[in-house]
Image (cartoon, rainbow, N blue to C red):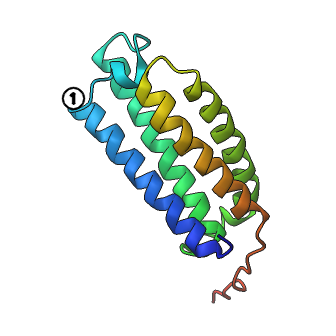
Amino acid sequence: MKDPKKIAFTMLALFGLLILFHCFVIAGWISPKSVWGERVQSDQDLIHVELASISMLFLYAMIVMAKVNIIDMDWIKPLAQLGLWMMAIYFVITSVTNAMGDTNLERFLFAPVALVLAILTVRLALIKTNHPPARDTI
């Protein structure tokens, strides 16, 4: 995949599915033990880690959208490239830790998803995108 918008939309779709998954965990439709094992001890801790995960996914989506000019946020554009490389490192680490996870869900679903996101993130980071010229404000 070489088209930056196709890469971005693929990543955004995966982020959306992951956000939906985390919402299902919060709602109790998916057992937190299948994701977090015994590491989350209380419902309050579960809410905190799930909301942190959802927040990170929204931040990642903003970085991806800024990179391919889907959103016009001048303040984030200089950070988008750095953000993509940080995301790539995060997804590589996540794929390795999920591959060594305690549950089949981590090993066989989330490790490959994280690896795909790592590859797509690196690919997007390597593509030069043309940012439209800054608009003059009067």
The residue shown at (41%, 30%) is 105
Q: Nearer the viewer, residue 67 or 92?
A: 92
Q: Is residue 79 above or below residue 43?
A: below
- Please give left or right for residue 105 compared with residue 32 in the image: right
Task: Name the spot of residue 56 as percent of width and height, x first.
Answer: 52, 43
Which quadrant: the C terminus?
bottom right
Question: In which image quadrant can residue 73 be found?
Answer: bottom right
The residue shown at (27%, 32%) is 26
Numbered disc total: 1
Q: Is residue 78 visible?
A: yes
Which quadrant: the N terminus?
bottom right
Count neighbours of disc 1 (C-alpha within 10 A) and say few if under 14, some if 14 to 19, many if 20 or more: few
Q: Nearer the viewer, residue 109 or 124?
A: 109
Q: Is residue 4 above or below residue 107?
A: below
The residue shown at (65%, 61%) is 76
Q: Is residue 49 visible?
A: no
Label 1: state its secondary structure: loop
Q: Amino acid at mark 1?
A: Gly
Question: In which image quadrant can residue 65 be found?
Answer: bottom right
The residue shown at (52%, 21%) is 101
Task: Name the spot of residue 57 as percent of width and height, x first.
Answer: 49, 47
Q: Nearer the viewer, residue 100 or 53?
A: 100
Residue matched to label 1:
28
- Please give left or right for residue 78 compared with residue 72 in the image: right
Question: In which image quadrant can residue 21 be found?
Answer: top left
Task: Name the spot of residue 109 as percent of width and height, x first.
Answer: 46, 37
- Please give left or right for residue 75 compared with residue 112 in the image: right
Task: Name the spot of residue 134 as percent of width and height, x first.
Answer: 70, 83
Q: Nearer the viewer, residue 5 or 84?
A: 5
